[in-house]
Image (cartoon, rainbow, N blue to C red):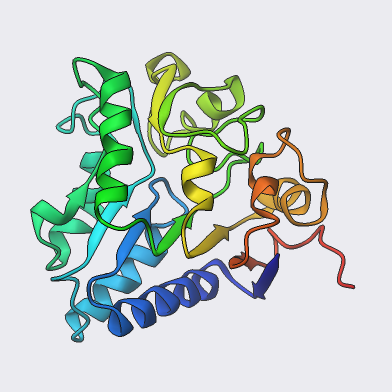
Amino acid sequence: MRYETFKTEQEASQAVATRIAELVSANPRIRLGLPTGSTPLGVYKELIRQHQAGLSFSEAVTFNLDEYLGLSGAHPQSYRYFMETNFFQHIDLPTWNRHLLDGVARYPELECQAYETKIQAQGGINLWFLGIGGNGHIAFNEPGSEVNSRTRIVSLTTETIEANSDGRFFKDPAEVPRCALSVGIGAIREADEIIVLALGEKKADAVFNAIQGPFDISCPASLLQDHANVTFYLDEAAASKLTRA
């Protein structure tokens, strides 16, 4: 795995945005996989700025990684709402090219299968942009997720529930849904390129385990180690436990 270290969260986020902008400019019909949460906010802010300066997403297609089971897209804590508020409404990406899992689908298993079909119908994902959880999860693939896992219903760990109820999003762990719909690790590994952004000291252990630990389901991000094109973008705090060869 490759990784790049930057002095600050802002510099790391800007570097990710620059890479995404390069890919969009080179391939206007790019298929992008996108995350939510606090980690990508700086990236989306910079991409909005670059859009205002001329970068167009008018032919791009996006797929989001996950959604809480039981939350509609109108719920303020749903990931559809997050994307609309923090990114989509500020750029020229057509609504019909924005793909997100439906947290209130009547048949969630079929929703997951249909999502995989949509990705394949588009020709697969060119770039998955990921964050990483403190326990090494990517999307909502918690420890124990298999390397060939597909889009499915997942149960969230106590650690993930608590991390999402620290005041940034939900105010109380009791408010956090216990399950989610998530693109699987197998689906993520099929992308041409993968970017992982990790910021802050709380991510240092997960980053170390993902990059320099064993290839093991105890750290889902480590299951990207044998992918041909993965780059971690880290601030100094997130990279603090890595040892340079």
Residue in the picture at 49% in, 71% down: 10
Residue in the picture at 59% in, 68% down: 229
- What is the total number of numbered labels drawn onto the structure image? 0
Look at the picture and state if 176 lies above or below 196.
above
Q: Residue 226 or 54: which is nearer the viewer? A: 226
Left or right: residue 144 compared with residue 214: left
Look at the picture and state if 181 lies above or below 243.
above
Q: Quadrant of residue 212?
A: bottom right
Left or right: residue 120 compared with residue 168: left
> Where in the figure is residue 72, as x and y percent of width and height?
19, 26
Residue in the picture at 77% in, 53% down: 208
Residue in the picture at 48% in, 37% down: 184
> Where in the figure is residue 21, as x and y percent of width and height?
34, 78
Q: Quadrant of residue 183?
A: top left
Specify the quadrant that holds the N terminus: bottom right
Specify the quadrant that holds the C terminus: bottom right
> Where in the figure is residue 215, as x and y percent of width and height?
77, 45
* Whether residue 171 can be seen here: no
